[in-house]
Image (cartoon, helix red, strand yellow):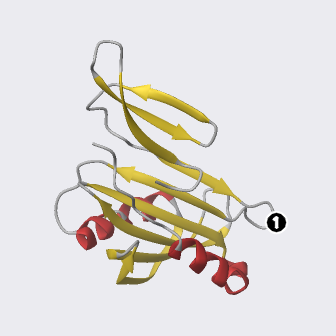
């Protein structure tokens, strides 16, 4: 579960069928069993005149294979969607208490902002959760501690049966 993001509880319906109840802050709703969770959680800061610093957390269901290979397979799509893409670093790292993988990018957004992005890849069951932290390139040094704290705060919790 992400702070302010989706959480799941299994609730019986009137017919006895199990459903998933998803909670997003103050909103909740039910979905049928077997539906895939492709959540996207986006939060942005408002303290930059260059580019709104943001965190985007996504979930890809049913990802097989090595986590590092999956992460590296995302790079061409990022390069295609941006300008002057540069992969600065890639590394294995413990994320949410388990083996994860980190990519660090520099690129120009479609809106022409020069940004730096850190992507943290970690498994949650058969899914891959990606936390992407992005800020203006010129603000990376000043925001480094905040970005590191946000990444360190990521946790993966057990889902209800």
Under tag 1, what secondary structure?
loop
Percent x, y for residue 21?
A: 43, 33
Q: Quadrant of the C terminus?
A: top left
Q: Residue furthest top?
A: 15
Number of numbered callouts drawn: 1
Percent x, y for residue 27?
A: 60, 34
Corner quadrant of residue 43: bottom right
Q: Is residue 83 left or right of residue 97?
A: right
Percent x, y for residue 137?
A: 66, 78
Corner quadrant of residue 25: top right
Q: Is residue 50 left or right of residue 78?
A: right
Vertical order, 113 against 40 (above or below): below
Vertical order, 86 against 56 (above or below): below
Q: Residue at x 18, y 57 (%)?
A: 64
Name the residue nearer the viewer: 79 or 11. Answer: 11
Percent x, y for residue 58?
A: 44, 53
Name the residue nearer the viewer: 103 or 40. Answer: 40
Q: Residue furthest left?
A: 65
Q: Is residue 23 left or right of residue 69?
A: right
**Residue located beneath label 1 in the image:** 47
Q: Residue at x 26, y 56 (%)?
A: 125
Count neighbours of disc 1 (C-alpha within 10 A) and say few if under 14, some if 14 to 19, many if 20 or more: few
Name the residue nearer the viewer: 44 or 89. Answer: 44
Name the residue nearer the viewer: 53 or 93. Answer: 93
């Amino acid at each position: 579960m992400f702070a302010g993001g989706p959480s799941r509880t299994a609730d019986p319906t009137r017919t006895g069928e199990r459903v998933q109840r998803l909670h997003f802050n103050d909103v909740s709703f039910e979905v049928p069993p077997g539906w895939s969770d492709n959540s996207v959680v986006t939060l942005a800061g408002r303290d930059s005149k260059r580019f709104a610093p943001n965190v985007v957390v996504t979930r890809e269901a049913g990802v097989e294979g090595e986590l590092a290979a999956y992460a590296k397979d995302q790079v061409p799509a990022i390069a295609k969607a941006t300008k002057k893409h540069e992969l600065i670093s890639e590394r294995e790292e413990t994320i949410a208490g388990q083996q994860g993988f980190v990519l660090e990018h520099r690129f120009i957004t479609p809106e022409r902002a020069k940004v730096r992005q850190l992507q943290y890849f970690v498994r949650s069951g058969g899914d891959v959760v990606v936390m992407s932290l992005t800020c203006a390139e010129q603000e990376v040094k000043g925001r480094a501690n905040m970005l590191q704290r946000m990444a360190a705060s990521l946790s993966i919790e057990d889902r209800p049966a």
